DNA sequence: TTCATAGTTCGACGCTAGCCGAAGCATTTC
DNA sequence: GAAATGCTTCGGCTAGCGTCGAACTATGAA
């Protein structure tokens, strides 16, 4: 029977696995759409909608409508710090998640994440694009450089066509298997389309794994100047 | 579908109102017994027992058995910081608890704790007994010194009669309101009996508060050489 | 010894909260 | 205009969790 802030209320908000997944997905600081978060949490959009409403109502998330999308991000630094501390305590208690995503090596190597390239190859690509100055950080955001536009044209991507929407051209997306960022945004999706169009890789239709042919992976590494495996 | 520490697990632990009450009650750093926490949380001892077991298993609490009591305290600084941050976020979200509890000053001043003296006067007594060499630390335990035996006789306590049982003569007991030790054990109980027998103080029968008469408190302070209030 | 108290275990009950299917806006695209 | 997409609301189902009564163990008191 204490007075004071209602810590149980917001702890309970974080305490649901689906919501916790959403929150950790947002820890990168990037805003994600409702559907992306639904996939991230492993629930249907209806369920996600309810969760997101409650998280917002509880002051943990901030919403930003943009066209028919709804971008969600953490409500503030304090929320981020809270989550980090929570991860620290959880790790200290030695409780790692049991429900580990499929340890499928193929998934870790290369997979599709909302129509862009993720996994080991995805993060390598992201690093290489930064090093080569094709994309650049601009504060919290990412932008396509002038050199990048030239590169895109040479790779067969029509940037002008991508720029019509208001959706960001470049976004970073945190990779669960690598804990590092890979490239999202319409440019990221275009790269994956191109990779498939060139026949370098194809999707496994019953999974998110992306299967590169040996020659395809070699061409991919050459194109983006990745160090060989 | 992320990997990493299971933040939902421990957030859910904090997310139950009863458990949250227990944790906030422990935020002062004081150790409390299982029953005290049950009262604090407003649940029956059975329910509390289950909660406390889960909190300990989850790495949030630390247990310390002492006789037939079980003292519980936060497992570490990190847990305390987590709770504080949680309160900060909760307060920021504008969610305050309505239920307010009594902070009875009389209870803090002097009360009965399993038949020995606790509260502010109890901890003062404990310190004075140590300083005057009536009791002394011996590793983790406490013992009555030779000087102490003489003092006890002068105060009207028959140490030989107390020594028949196997129960320790002197024990320290953590004080919830002061977060400091006071004297327990059969010697501690004997002191309280003597205080009551001398008419210095009397129990309030519907509470654990101990009511000293003005003259009684003065005599008590003189007897044990406490600094005046 | 016998009694009282602190704490635990077990079992059963009830309620909450998460989940999804179906249907309903709202916005964008063709 | 019609179709598609992103998101929300509603309703019903189910699993899980918190709750307590009753019975049990262990420690301390008389």
Image (tube, coloured by chain):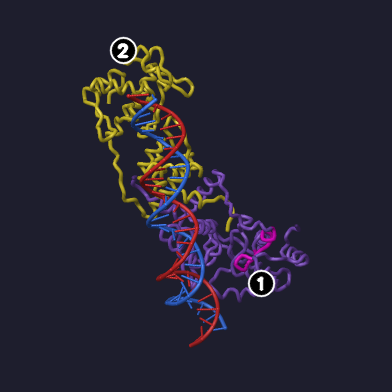
Chain colours: A purple, B yellow, C blue, D red
Q: Is residue A194 left or right of residue B171?
A: right
Q: Disc 1 versus disc 2: distance between alpha carbons?
A: 94 Å
Q: Which x, y percent locates residue A74?
A: 48, 58
Q: Which x, y percent locates residue A225?
A: 73, 62
Which residue is nearer to you in this view: C29 or A105? A105
Q: Which x, y percent locates residue B178?
A: 36, 32
Q: Quick check: can you spot residue A132?
A: no
Residue at the image point whose x is 48% and y is 70% from the top = A66
Q: Residue beneath label 1, please?
A: A193
Q: Residue beneath label 2, please?
A: B154
Q: Please provide the residue range marked out in magenta.
A: A105-117
Q: Quadrant of residue A182?
A: bottom right
Q: Quadrant of residue A107?
A: bottom right
Specify whether disc 1 shares its chain with disc 2. Answer: no
Which residue is nearer to you in this view: B102 or C11? C11
Q: Quick check: can you spot residue B162?
A: yes
Check the image and name the residue furthest to the right.
A215
């Amino acid at each position: 029977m204490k007075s004071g802030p209602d810590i149980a209320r917001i702890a309970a908000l974080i305490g649901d696995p689906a919501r916790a997944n959403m929150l950790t997905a947002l820890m990168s600081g990037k805003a994600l759409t409702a559907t992306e978060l639904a996939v991230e949490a492993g629930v249907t959009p209806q369920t996600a909608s309810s969760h997101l409403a409650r998280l917002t109502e509880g002051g943990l998330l901030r919403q930003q409508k943009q066209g028919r999308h709804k971008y969600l991000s953490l409500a503030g630094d304090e929320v981020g710090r809270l989550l980090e501390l929570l991860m620290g305590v959880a790790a200290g208690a030695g409780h790692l998640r049991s429900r580990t995503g499929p340890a499928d090596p193929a998934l870790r190597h290369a997979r599709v994440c909302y129509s862009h390239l993720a996994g080991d190859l995805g993060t390598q690509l992201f690093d290489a694009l930064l090093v080569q100055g094709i994309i650049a950080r601009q504060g919290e955001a990412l932008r396509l450089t002038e050199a990048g536009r030239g590169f895109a044209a040479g790779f067969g991507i029509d940037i002008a066509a991508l720029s019509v929407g208001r959706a960001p051209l470049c976004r970073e997306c945190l990779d669960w298997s690598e804990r590092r960022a890979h490239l999202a945004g319409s440019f990221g999706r275009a790269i994956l389309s191109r990779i498939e169009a060139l026949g370098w890789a194809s999707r496994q239709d019953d999974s998110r794994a992306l299967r590169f042919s040996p020659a395809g992976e070699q061409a991919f590494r050459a194109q983006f100047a990745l160090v060989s495996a």
